[in-house]
Image (cartoon, rainbow, N blue to C red):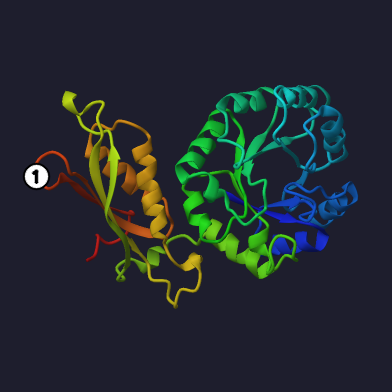
Amino acid sequence: MTKFLASVRDAAEAVGALEGGADMIDVKDPVSGALGAASPQVLQAVREAVGGRAPVSAVTGDLPMEPDHILPAVLARRDADYVKIGFFPADEGAWQRVCDALARDAASVARIAVLFAEDHAPDPAFLDLLAASGFRGVMLDTRRKDGRRLLDHLSPVALEDFVEQARQRGLMSGLAGALEAPDVPRLLGARPDYLGFRGALTDGGRDARLVPERVSRIAALIQPAAVSQAADGKPLDRVYIRDFVQEMEIGAYGFERGRRQRVSFSIDAGILPPGHVPEDMAAVLSYDIMMDAVRSVVARGHTVLVETLAEELAARLLRETRVVDVVVRVEKLDLGPAAAGVEIRRGRTGHAAVQH
């Protein structure tokens, strides 16, 4: 289950973040750079205010990629549950030197590497190095705090691949970077261990004070209430996409190998009515989730059967707590007739059949 990391700059904000539903408290100075470091004294005050109710992480700052700069900053924050270290652009071999020094001299510190989406897609070889060097996890963030979000740099498919690559190496994964409320449902599909926020928790950007009500709003998106079984039989709202055409490799015949063809996807999801006029993303199911799911299965490469695509999409959508049932239609458009494919209907156990 994905958890909620809230970045705070002092003990008072830490208490507000906990009361709002944050699962991890991240201590930083947001006015001092992408990973502006709070002092060890502020970290200590936050830890005392949190009182063990949630893990506390601390960042080391925007430092040159040299062990002589990074190692002292890590050791000064070793009392945190996790210490986050930014891996900024540097000369060849610098990242290796930093990892080697930390593995040798800070092995007892639980370390999280922070990579930046503007620089390049995460390199699986570097994830191997992090795992071998004793890092506990890896996070993707944005380095330039210019309003561009993580999803402006990397697609949901790329982020899902990053999370899976980290998981395969035993690393926790986190996603952050100017995230906003509408980003949450899309990023939950990647199933990271943490989603990190700062600016969305304030009334005036990342430099302003944290507002507990905004924390609660993000918490409700990351940890939405379960679908009520008592609502079985009530009319459902429908959220859908129709005729979303993608080119992909698909088919069981030899002539279908090594060539791309057009496939149309239509998805119709039944969700329980919110009971009030929706005012934020916590009350609705975003159709972006459906399109992201389609892009994800298409990106995996050759698929033999349209039935496989339909079942995978239905299962993925039913992971969403808002979704009670789903209709998935997958059609191949280049076989001769206008369309040939399959439509399936799936629902949660204990709920009525699909309603139209």
* Towards the viewer: 203 or 55: 203
Describe residue 196's horizontal placement relative to residue 67 as left or right: left
Q: Nearer the viewer, residue 92 or 112?
A: 92
Q: Residue at x 88, y 47 (%)?
A: 40
Closer to the camera, 226 or 29? 29
Query: The C terminus lies in which quarter of the figure?
Result: bottom left
Residue 341 in the figure: left or right of residue 272: left
- Identify which residue is drawn at 58% across, 44% down: 193
Tell me residue 269's x, y (percent).
Answer: 32, 59
**Which amino acid does the dot numbered 1 rest on?**
Pro
Visible residue check, residue 148? yes
Q: Is residue 253 visible?
A: no
* Residue 229 in picture, x, y percent from top left: 39, 63
Looking at this rendering, what residue extends furthest in the bottom direction? 277
Dividing the picture into quadrants, the one containing residue 220 is bottom right
Q: How many marks?
A: 1
In the structure shown, which secondary structural element does the residue marked by tag 1 occupy? loop
Q: Is residue 256 left or right of residue 65?
A: left
Residue that protrudes farthest toward the left in the picture: 337
Q: Position of residue 67 (x, y in %)?
A: 82, 28
- Residue at the image position 72 percent from the left and 48 percent from the top: 34
Name the residue that disc number 1 marks: 337
220 relative to 143, above or below: below
Q: Position of residue 42 (x, y in %)?
A: 87, 53
Q: Which quadrant holds residue 263?
A: top left
Q: Is residue 220 above or below residue 254?
A: below
Q: Badge 1, how many Cα within 10 Å: few under 14, some, many 20+? A: few
